[in-house]
Image (spheres, rainbow, N blue to C red):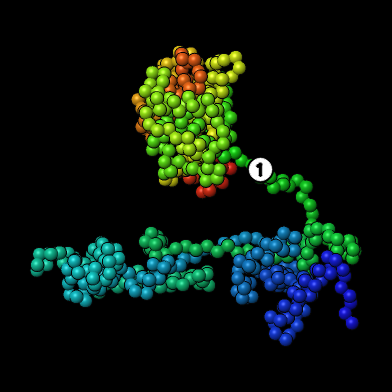
Amino acid sequence: RAPALPAGRGRHQALCAADATSARAARCGDVAIDHSDTSTKKPAHKSAKMDLEAAVLGALAAGADASFDTFAQAKALGVNHQQLVGAVKSLSVDGYVSADQASTTWLCATAEGAAVAKDGSPEYRVYAAVRDADGLAVSALEAAVGKTAAKVGLGAAMREKWLSKAPGADGAPALAVAKPDVADATRRELEPFVGLAEPPATPASLPADREKQLMRRKLLKRETLKHFRVARGAAYSATRQRKVADLTVEALRDGSWKTAEFKAYNYASVGAPVSGGYFQPLLKVRAEFRKILMGMGFEEMPTSKWVESSFWNFDALFQPQSHPARDAHDTFFVKEPASTLKWPADYYERVKSMHVSGGAGSIGHRCPFKEDEARKQILRTHTTAVSARMLYQLANRPGGFTPQKYFSIDRVFRNETMDSTHLCEFHQVEGLVADYDLNLGNLKCIIRTFFAEIGITQLRFKPAFNPYTEPSMEVFGYHPDLKKWTEIGNSGIFRPEMLAPMGLPPNVRVIAWGLSLERPTMIKYRISNIRDLFGHKADLDRTRAAPLCVFP
């Protein structure tokens, strides 16, 4: 009668075990297989290793002076030499055997040398083709012996003066035999060295000059075999008693720990290094930029709002609703929620009026302004949307306007075609200064100061167009590695049409500039493909090994 199964979790485990045993029996037909002993059976590779260790110890059982060579012993046992060496090294660690390393070298033919030994040397094949044809045109040689043999063999045969070259009957170069009864010495010399995968009992030899010449032609090579002379060690025994590595619960229960021999503990060993987190190169450059900008007196803006409304991203910057940058092929639109819920109503009306009718000396865009277009939710295309919010708050704070310097470093998103220098998401560094009566000279001074801090002192400014700055300038810096001028940023003075609806005083000017974080990082760390820096293809080993970012 079968014993009752336990209740609860134990019963469930027992039922699962019974089902598994039944399934195994079903797969094996009518024969029931006992799996209860599998935990005590040793894997095949461990059993083979133990057999080799027993063979090594048995070979030294003849006496205290007994010894053997591992290569000869491996051949006698019919086992792989490296496997036998592994068993010897394992035994030597515990002092059962001592092993002295030796090496044996011998010459053997390369694959090309074996082909020469079989088919003849290229120079002899060329000679034989000319001899058998009783003269042969140079142009016909390749067809007779093959392209490789013709290329190599003709020069060698001419150097040996086996052949002569003279104009043929048609005026084309032709070959003729110059030395009769030539033997293929190269083939004869290589034949004893073909197929020597191990040291021969009686190695063949060659004159030193011929050996050197055949090795230079890569027809011969020198092989080396490392083997060991094995003798009894200080702790030799006919059988190996393996030392116990851990004190287990089973050993404590059955008392086997009392007679077991434990492996010695190395208390001086160093533990494995703990792998912690690593800063991505972009974060290292961002931290350095933040330190520089804060040292220049800038205050960081809050930039955690990745989803932005088209109103703050475009309309508040006086960018027309018909601008191509607002199309789906340039901007990521949010599907749900598709529209923003609120904004400052009075500010919205002032912005709308500026677009439609103008103001502050401007005639505006004079185009329709749709509220549903302004309410569309997008992934922000630039951090200037954050700058617009901050300037609106600055203009409407209690106590009125006070001059400020702001900066931001955060991620932006654009629907671009990805390549080695462009991604759909990247990081933008932006700075602005709001103060009375600022001009272009102030902007250039700020830009020169910042770029000097990161080691770029050679700058050029080029007039440009931006929808929300006037005047606008592109910033170029001289790249010492590329030896050329390259664009590193954009800048300008925010338009009055953008600032007036915010409520800023008429004589307040806002100068602003920006650049990507990825480009200076790629230059700093010598990275040519942006996908190796940022994204799922980035190399984690490069991230771990990236040095600290310090700008001069």
Residue located at (37% from left, 28% from top): 366
Q: What x and y, as percent, mark residue 335?
A: 52, 46
Q: Is residue 506 above or below residue 241?
A: above
The answer to whether 77 appears left or right of 308 in the picture is right
The answer to whether 521 appears left or right of 486 in the picture is right
Which residue is more in the foreground, 518 or 259? 518
Residue located at (51% from left, 19% from top): 503
Residue of label 1: 276
- Disc 1 crowd rating (10 Å Cα; few below 14, some 14-19, many 20+) is few
Which residue is more in the foreground, 329 or 102? 329
Residue 495 visible in the snapshot:
no
Q: How many marks?
A: 1
Q: Is residue 412 above or below residue 347?
A: below
Asked where in the image residue 261 lies, by quadrant, the reply is bottom right
The answer to whether 257 appears left or right of 350 in the picture is right
Residue located at (39% from left, 36% from top): 322
